[in-house]
Amino acid sequence: MGCKLNYAETSTIERSFSKKNYKNVSFKDYADVYIINSCCVTENAENEFKYIVRSVKRRNPQSIVIAMGCYAQYNPKKVSSIYGVDRVLNNDDKFNIVDIISDINVEVKNKKDKKLFYSSFSFGKRTRSFLKIQDGCNYKCSYCIIPFSRGKSISDRIENISKNINFLLKNGIKEIVLTGVNIGDYRGTNNKGKIYNFFELIQYIEQYIIENINIENIRIRLSSIEPNLLKDELIEFLSKSKYFVPHFHIPLQSGNNFLLGKMQRRYQRELYENKINKIRNLIPNAYIGSDVIVGFPGETYNHFLDTYFFLKKLDISYMHIFTYSSRPNTKSINFLEQIPNNIKRKRNKILKILSNKKYYSFCKEQIKTKKTVLFEKQSKNKPFLYGYTENYIRTKIFDPYLKYENSMQNVILLEIDKNGVILVESFH
């Protein structure tokens, strides 16, 4: 459930079972053991978890259901009390799950002390891999539960990252997405104790690939990065990079400075706008996504209009709109002036319409241009293959014989369909 980080960790845990002669099956299939890597960002995520537990217990009432992940770490007592959950593992024990699977009485504590970093990456099922470089968060945004469930920021050693990149690229992966809770806060060391910040890590990865991996047509993509951690020198470096693609996801959350203060974000909207302008000046065709929260406690109509018109003038490509969900033990749960659900829904809908307009406008600007698409493995028997350009435009190509499956192809963008997917044709 949840984010790219959870996906990377789930894939790593899945491989640990394969090594011990377990047979991995689809989660929709009959199984002896079901493992749910949970999320707790919103109340909807918790409700979805309960639904999943009920569904697998209907499939096999005698099965063992193991809960792990953020929801299980944050509120183990509540999770263990859910009918159908047999075992609950904390964020450290989940990486030892194969060894402790026979132990029913697992004690779970909300650990806030120093923790270990567990390297993780997805591999084997997709054309791209999510590589975990960092975990946890030292920020204290007033609405966010993640620091409670993931703990303080911790980073992987730089040699582990380069070893994993080497393995993935030399075993057929053509795109790696660097992921974590707050990747811009990366502070990793090498074996000699030298500390690398995020910008230094990016430089290191680029140089490592140039010197050690003789493979053409490979990509490195960044996941979400905080605007205050997206330094100008990093944008300048990425604009000239051979391997890092022109794709940014930069959470905003609100276009009103008063609400940004209440949210305890570490920037104001002027800094955010400067970052967007910097990217557009240096990388005109870059895809820029954003996160926005509607219905935050105290968000007046004028505050919402501030956000709307700020977003309308920003040259961004897409917005992921979150409806505010109060989470236990966060500061914002005690804020006065909670917003009614019907108003939240209206504001969410308004921003989604704006987001769709921005995405279609961005895509139309790309029509008739030449791009490179990484086509995915076909999941269903269809005449089209789907994939993403380097600047994250969803595309499709007519390919009934699957000759482009899991490959990088030079294409021309032709036309956009009603679902926002661009039809392309290959050229050589």
Image: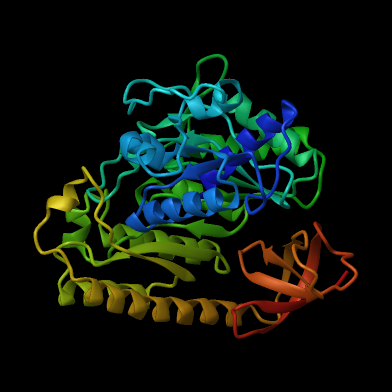
Figure check: 195 above or below 343: above
- Residue at position x 89%, y 65% in the image: 403
User: Residue 340: x, y in percent?
Assistant: 18, 71
Q: Describe residue 188's horizontal placement relative to residue 314 as left or right.
A: right
Q: Report the colour scheme.
A: rainbow
Total marks shown come to 0
User: Residue 314: x, y in percent?
Assistant: 38, 72
User: Residue 353: x, y in percent?
Assistant: 41, 81
- Residue at position x 38%, y 51% in the image: 46
- Residue at position x 80%, y 67% in the image: 410
Q: Describe residue 214's horizontal placement relative to residue 26 as left or right.
A: right
Residue 135 found in image quarter:
top left
User: Residue 182: x, y in percent?
Assistant: 42, 42
- Residue at position x 38%, y 26% in the image: 108
Residue 151 found in image quarter:
top left
Figure check: 197 above or below 103: below
Residue 137 seen anywhere in this rendered image of the structure:
no
Could you tell me which quadrant the C terminus lies in?
A: bottom right
